């Protein structure tokens, strides 16, 4: 493992641990807001590149305190699937992961199962990048395969641009 990869994995782990630690505080009595916590689902779509072009579709869930500051640092689970574009044999990459942001820094770690006809490979991808309140997310990372062989050559750098839409925007405002 290269020195750069070790640093990337260490930073990703520390950011995930710190954000999870910050969310562990369940005592919140905010008089400014009606609810002490917000649960938010996002529907997302985007583009990613890692030797092949992929379209990404998924959902994200975040749970944060309504203290006016937590919006700058939050994390939650994400799941979805990437679909290859313009390949002779279609490649599907269903994934589940943990991602979030710290101010404008996006981070995440995904477990992926790459499927192409008779070939399957289990992989994981740590990623870091830029996030604008999870509505726009631009990240880069490295896809590591967990199998000894790599028949689809997926072990490579990955870049993605994801746009997300919060489902709370579809709900009507509650009367005051």
Image (spheres, rainbow, N blue to C red):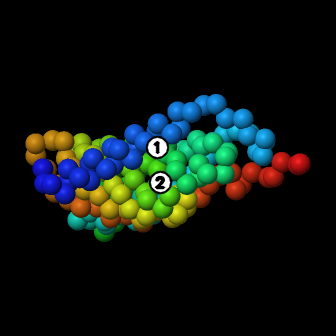
**Residue furthest toward the top?**
27
**Residue furthest toward the bottom?**
86
At x 33%, y 49%, the residue is 12
Q: Tell me, yes or no, whether the two marked residues, 1 and 2, touch with CB atoms within 8 Å.
A: yes
Looking at the image, is 114 positioned above or below residue 105?
A: above
At x 26%, y 53%, the residue is 8
What residue is disc 1 on?
Answer: 19
Quadrant of the image occupied by residue 64: top right
At x 73%, y 40%, the residue is 30
- The x and y percentages for residue 10 are 27, 47
Give the secondary structure at mark 2.
strand
Q: Inspect this view and state whether residue 50 appears.
A: yes
Which is nearer the N-term, disc 1 or disc 2?
1
Q: State the residue in front, 157 or 120.
A: 157
At x 67%, y 46%, the residue is 67
Looking at the image, is 135 positioned above or below residue 95?
A: below
Give the secondary structure at mark 1.
helix
Q: Residues within 10 Å of mark 1 (few under 14, many from 20)?
A: some
What residue is disc 2 on?
Answer: 102
How many labels sit on residues?
2
- The x and y percentages for residue 161 are 42, 66
Q: Inspect this view and state whether residue 115 appears.
A: no
**Residue furthest toward the right?**
176
- The x and y percentages for residue 89 are 25, 59
């Amino acid at each position: 493992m290269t020195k750069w990869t070790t640093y990337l994995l260490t930073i990703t782990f520390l950011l995930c641990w710190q954000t999870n630690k910050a969310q562990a505080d369940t005592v919140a009595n905010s008089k400014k807001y009606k609810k002490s916590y917000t649960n938010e689902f996002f529907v997302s779509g985007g583009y990613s590149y890692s030797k092949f072009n992929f379209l990404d579709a998924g959902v994200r869930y975040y749970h944060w305190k309504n203290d006016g500051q937590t919006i700058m640092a939050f994390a939650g689970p994400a799941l979805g699937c990437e679909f290859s574009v313009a390949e002779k044999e279609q490649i599907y990459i269903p994934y589940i992961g943990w991602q979030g942001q710290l101010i404008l820094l996006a981070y995440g770690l995904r477990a992926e199962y790459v499927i192409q006809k008779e070939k399957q490979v289990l992989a994981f991808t740590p990623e870091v990048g830029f996030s604008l309140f999870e509505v726009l997310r631009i990240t880069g990372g490295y896809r590591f395969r967990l199998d000894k062989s790599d028949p689809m050559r997926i072990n490579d750098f990955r870049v993605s641009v994801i746009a997300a839409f919060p489902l709370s925007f579809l709900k009507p405002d509650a009367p005051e």
